[in-house]
Amino acid sequence: MRRRLLKSLREYKIYALLSPLLSGLEASLDIIVPTFMAYLIDYGINRQDMDAVLKYGLLLVVSAVTSMVFGFLAGKSTAIASAGFARNLRNDIFHTTQTFSFSNIDRFSTSSIITRLTTDVENVQRAFQMTTRIGARSPVMLVFALYFSFRTSVRLSLVFLGATVILGLGLYFSIRHVYPVFKRVFKRYDHMNRIVQENLLAIRVVKNYTRESHEKRHFASISQLIYEDFTTAGIRVARISPLMNFCVFLSTTLIAWLGANEIVASGNNPALGLTTGQLTSLITYTMQILISLMMLSNIFIFFLVSRASVERIVEVLDETSDLQNGPDPVYEVLDGSIVFENVKFAYSAESEKPVLCDINLSIPSGARVGILGGTGSSKSTLIQLIPRLYDVVEGRVLVGGVDVRDYDLASLRDQVSIVLQRNQLFTGSVKDNLRWGDEHATDEEMARACQLAQADDFIRAMPEGYDSHIERGGANLSGGQRQRLCIARSLLKNPKILIFDDSTSAVDTKTDRLIREGLREGIPDTTVLIISQRVASVRDADMIIVMDDGTVHDCGTHEELLRRSEIYCEVYESQNRGGVLNAS
């Protein structure tokens, strides 16, 4: 998994290689310092030899300064490599999610993907930073400190081995009990993010129903679970620090006691035993060895945290879209004709009942088609098969005489535009949002599209016209204004097939009629499909498809369906009694 992630290093690979190299050089110089200090004491201070004091003092200064330079360069390389690695990793995750089909997205919640892009990447970045910096420095320091300490006194250095065994056992048991907690806590992070996201998106509904207290309790419950998990993990990790301090104090005390006995017995004579300078260096090596072990234990803990994050990130990176281009994709859509041949569809292979069953339709290019049906009749699912947002289970869907599975996905979707009931607008100007349809659209083209969508008047009435600011989601516009702006945006795309998924539900019937008339005159060659709950929105269509429970109940013109379709007649009569049709 880590090899999979390291592919995101790319242009920062040189910094990732320099960091451990420079850290190793820094550590090796730090190891030399206690030896020079021992020489300074034994050959300079004890013998009152100022030449030796100057010589070893100068070596100490040079070693310290050089170590500082290497440390600075190592820190700089680590910072660049880790930040660049995290940036590339976020980009890779985001780019991967952009290739997902709807079924892929259904397997990952939005809140989970956000957690993986933020918290999980930050955890991996910290683990990478510690590995390239401390992970290289600590082993070098540990090995060299052990070498110099054994060279100084084998008997006293055996104390280190006992301390290492104690620390190793403590670290093993901590790791074994901490990892499951961290793995669980990230799933709870997903849940918490989902709660926050739903609350903020539906904040008007929350306030309308005065459900703030309920939402607070809901958030507090998951926040409490995360608190309990981190407390448990923190307590288990905290056991390492006291154990480390115990080993440091015990080792220092034992070495000082045993070393002092040797110095007294030998009379501080290097030829007979240990000297004061050597004891000083041994105590320093004790600190370096145990600090190195402590740093390595911290790295292991970060690995524990990052391992759960790595698994979650790789899970996204390894996910492949269910919808892929064929070996020889078609890049040109000839016209807007649509054919459904024995189509069957289900969202999941485990579904007992298909969502769509035995769909057979033929829609000529340039036709105006209405799609009517009750809630749950699968009207929206039907039209989502046209731009291949999902693939059929059986049968096939043809656009321009070609199976949609044979098209290049981008080419197909560029010629099929869907206007949803709740289309998304983005923070920026009116022009910025319109140019989602055509980033090179001129002011005249935007104005023409808005006129057809009956949006030009309200846009020009805004303070800055087409340069007016739109808040996220179009919060400063009414529902009808948002829908008309989204229709204009789709018209700028100049597609061969234009689909309205109940996208005029928020406009009055007069505006709805003006939009339909504008489309008939403004884009006569485009195939237009209109999903609606209102008969008035589809009655003048060339063909009306009546859906019922995932099947085509009937198909024909308004007059034909009034004669033979019971469902259509019921809808027509109920709306006519309510004055809906008369109003149009």
Image: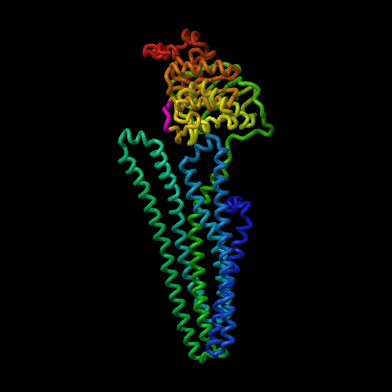
Side (left or right) of 244 relative to 154: left
Q: Main secondary structure of the magenta part?
A: loop
Asked whether residue 244 is in view, the answer is yes
Instruction: Using the image as rendered, state which of residue 567 and residue 335 is in the foreground.
Output: 335
Residue 223 against residue 402 in the figure, above or below: below
Residue positioned 63% across, 52% down in the render? 11
**Which residue lies most toward the front here?**
463
Q: Position of residue 52 (x, y in %)?
A: 58, 86
Q: Which residues are magenta?
A: 475-479
Q: Position of residue 551 (x, y in %)?
A: 50, 20
Instruction: Using the image as rendered, state which of residue 331 and residue 79 is in the foreground.
Output: 79
Residue 229 against residue 488 in the figure, above or below: below
Instruction: Using the image as rendered, state which of residue 521 and residue 380 is in the foreground.
Output: 521
- The quadrant the C terminus occupies is top left
Q: Position of residue 505 (x, y in %)?
A: 44, 22
Residue positioned 60% across, 50% down in the render? 8
Q: Give the colour scheme of this rendering.
A: rainbow
Residue 291 against residue 558 in the figure, above or below: below
On whether residue 185 falls in the magenta region, the answer is: no
**Which residue lies most toward the right here?**
328
Residue positioned 45% across, 49% down in the render? 186
Asked whether residue 344 is in view, the answer is no
| Count of numbered circles in the view | 0
Q: Position of residue 3 (x, y in %)?
A: 60, 53
